[in-house]
Image: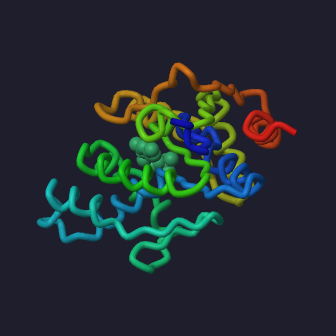
Amino acid sequence: MASLPVVAIDGPVGVGKSSVARRIAERLGFLFLDTGAMYRAVTLKFLELPEHERTDERLAALGESLDIELANDGTVLLGGRDVTLDIRDERVSRAVAIAADSRAVREALVRKQRAIGSARPCVMEGRDITTVVFPDARWKFYLDASARVRAQRRVDQLQAMGKEASFASIHRDLVERDARDRAREWGALSIAADATVIDTTEMTEQQTIALICAIVAPA
Ligand code: DC
């Protein structure tokens, strides 16, 4: 069977997967799917429940019934409500492991991701796309960069927005999230044996995009 026209991209937190994946999707005319947004959306819904209703059963049901629309420009609609900013809230970021560590949620979201990626060409990014969701994707990439460089990029982004940023606390947070993503029982972040590893430590975003596009759609 021919492999699916999916560009699967995995990598650690803060490596720039979303931004790179979105621009590649634009260039190729493919759908862009940020799977982290799906885990964030389930988490947001869960946090909106009254505390006594936050059970494993409700969590699993939220994964199963998730009514989410992800636009190529990054807009996220949940049951028609625009939650683009809400899902990036610090409260959701701190709690997102609730959804990402749940096997029931992962199974439900992986099913949705496979349905989307099987329907049309897409660029899909996350932690387990090359290993679990689409191990048979036509193109598989693992983006990497040292934790220090990823932390510094985040500091630069925040400062450019006029926000305060502490390198030490951002670096610590990033290392903790990496460890958690790598230790997850199901869908852990790992490098697929047949993925192309791109170390972006010394690369600009433009160079990374150009390299991936040259592999996916050689001139
Ligand atoms: O990429 P992100 O930071 O928006 O992802 C949010 C969380 O979801 C993060 O803790 C890792 C998790 N995640 C995952 O477990 N599997 C994916 N395919 C995508 C994200």
- Viewer can see residue 7: yes
Residue at the limit of the structure toward the left, as seen here: 52
**What is the residue that sits farthest to the front in this orientation?**
1
Horizontal side of residue 152 vs 204, given as left or right: left
Residue placed farthest to the right in the image? 219
In the depicted view, which residue is nearer to us: 116 or 98?
A: 116
Q: Identify which residue is drawn at 14% across, 57% down.
A: 57
Image coordinates of residue 110 in percent, x first then y, are 38, 48
Q: Position of residue 80 (x, y in %)?
A: 44, 80
Please count the marks in the image: 0
- At horizontal 67% and vertical 50% (from top left) the residue drawn is 19
**Viewer-side residue, 164 vs 151:** 151
Q: Is residue 35 above or below residue 13?
A: below
Position of 133 with respect to 158 (left or right) is left
Residue 173 seen: no
In the figure, 115 relative to 173: above or below? below
User: Depth check: 146 or 128 in front?
Assistant: 128
Between residue 91 and residue 97, name the one nearer to us.
97
Residue 202 placed where, x, y %?
A: 77, 27
Residue 130 x/y as whole percent: 50, 34
